[in-house]
Image (tube, helix red, strand yellow):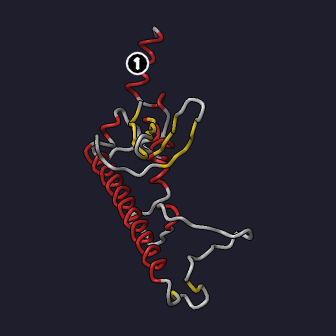
Amino acid sequence: FGAFVRVADGIEGLVHISELSGKHVELAEQVVSVGEEVFVKVIDIDLERRRISLSLKQANDSVDPFGTEFDPALYGMVTEYDENGEYKYPEGFDSVSGVWLEGFDAQREKWEQEYAAAQARWEAHKAQVAKTLEAEATAAADFGGSAFTSEQAGSGTLADDEALAALREKLSGR
């Protein structure tokens, strides 16, 4: 099937085996371990059947493990926009000068804590992606570096392979 992931207390979702990795996976254990914390993307919520479909593959696709562009809204920081779609800065922050106004220390501290927590989640997600890429590279090296590429696929068809051609002849009774 795949792997069940606890999204929050009392809420679990399934990462189907096809959504664990961009590579073919036979067992979920090839990608994740019991108790391991992973970042997933919610791809469907079926309220009728009370099911949440998740994707590890899609969550990792958009993350550059060496990137520097951080969007705190993607990692749990609440963002608000006005009716024109403009970002609403936190109360006490002057967007023109880029500084916090006096008397808003509590709001500033709360915002900085939320930002730091979101950034920590982003760093952990980048580490997850780097680990996945490293594991895939190691797996490819363990198999002699052989991987299917467009160059190999373009070099011929299955019928061109002598062993497969012989098997085809044997099965067809020639």
Q: Position of residue 86 (x, y in %)?
A: 68, 73
Asked if one can make out residue 141 in the rendered structure from this viewpoint, the answer is: yes
Mark 1 Cα-neighbour bin, 10 Å: few <14, some 14–19, many ≥20: few
- 47 sits left or right of 113 in the view: right
Local secondary structure at mark 1: helix
Residue 29: x, y in percent?
30, 37
- Quadrant of the image containing the N terminus: top left
Q: Name the residue furthest left.
A: 142
121 relative to 2, above or below? below
Name the residue at the top extreme. 173
Q: Is residue 151 visible?
A: no
Residue visible at 42% across and 40% down in the picture? 10
**Which quadrant of the view contains residue 142?**
top left
| Closer to us: 112 or 14 | 112
Residue 120, quarter of the rendered image: bottom left
* Residue plotted at (27% across, 45% down): 144
Q: Nearer the viewer, residue 139 or 29?
A: 29
Residue visible at 61% across and 89% down in the picture: 96
- For label 1, the residue is 167
Q: Position of residue 116 (x, y in %)?
A: 40, 71
170 sits left or right of 143 in the view? right
